[in-house]
Image (cartoon, helix red, strand yellow):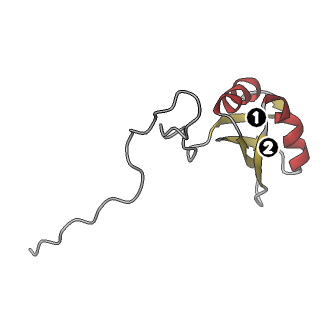
Amino acid sequence: MARIYVGNLPLDIRERDLEDLFWKYGRIRDLNLKNPARPPAFAFVSFERYEDAEDAIRGRDGVMFEGQRLRVEMSKGSAEALGVSSGGYGGGGGGGTPVGPAAPRPHTPL
């Protein structure tokens, strides 16, 4: 599964609008729409396949939608964006830099 970030959305956007924008790129597993008090709205769209997410980025990044230029990119929290494979074709994966808090340092009195 791969998740993309969709930014610069109008505040009146609905989940159905997002589905209409992205359905043709592949099976959508999840939509997480955020409508903050101040514009712009943004969303996370999860696709079943990584390749579908890449296609959606290529097809929709920079496209005008209701007077707004969409910003579409791989989500920073997506496992694939961190260099970690979730399996599937090609196998392998892993590596990269561990993500998480740093280990505590020992306390040395002054």
Residue 75: image x %, image y %? 61, 42
> Rounded to the nearest whole Å, what is the CA distance between mark 2 and mark 1?
7 Å
Dot 2 or dot 1, earlier in sequence: 2
Residue 48: image x %, image y %? 71, 39
Q: Residue furthest left?
A: 110
State the quadrant of the N terminus. top right
- Determine the residue positioned at 76% across, 34% down: 70
Residue occupied by mark 2: 9
Residue 66 in view in this figure: no
Residue 95: image x %, image y %? 39, 38
Tag 2 near tag 1, CB within 8 Å: yes
Q: Secondary structure at mark 1?
A: loop
Q: Is residue 32 left or right of residue 90?
A: right
Q: Is residue 92 left or right of residue 66?
A: left
Establish if 59 lies above or below 103. above
Residue 90: image x %, image y %? 53, 27
State the quadrant of the C terminus. bottom left
For this rendering, which residue is in front, 87 or 62? Answer: 87
Q: Which mark is residue 70?
A: 1
For this rendering, which residue is in front, 19 or 52? Answer: 52
Total count of labels: 2
Q: Residue furthest bottom?
A: 109
- Determine the residue positioned at 55% across, 37% down: 87
Residue 28 in view in this figure: yes
Establish if 8 lies above or below 37. above
- Determine the residue positioned at 74% across, 48% down: 42
Q: Secondary structure at mark 2?
A: strand
For this rendering, which residue is in front, 6 or 83? Answer: 83
Is disc 2 surrounded by few (<14), some (14 to 19) or many (20+) residues within 10 Å?
many
Three-letter residue code for mark 1 = Leu
Three-letter residue code for mark 2 = Leu
- Determine the residue positioned at 64% across, 33% down: 50
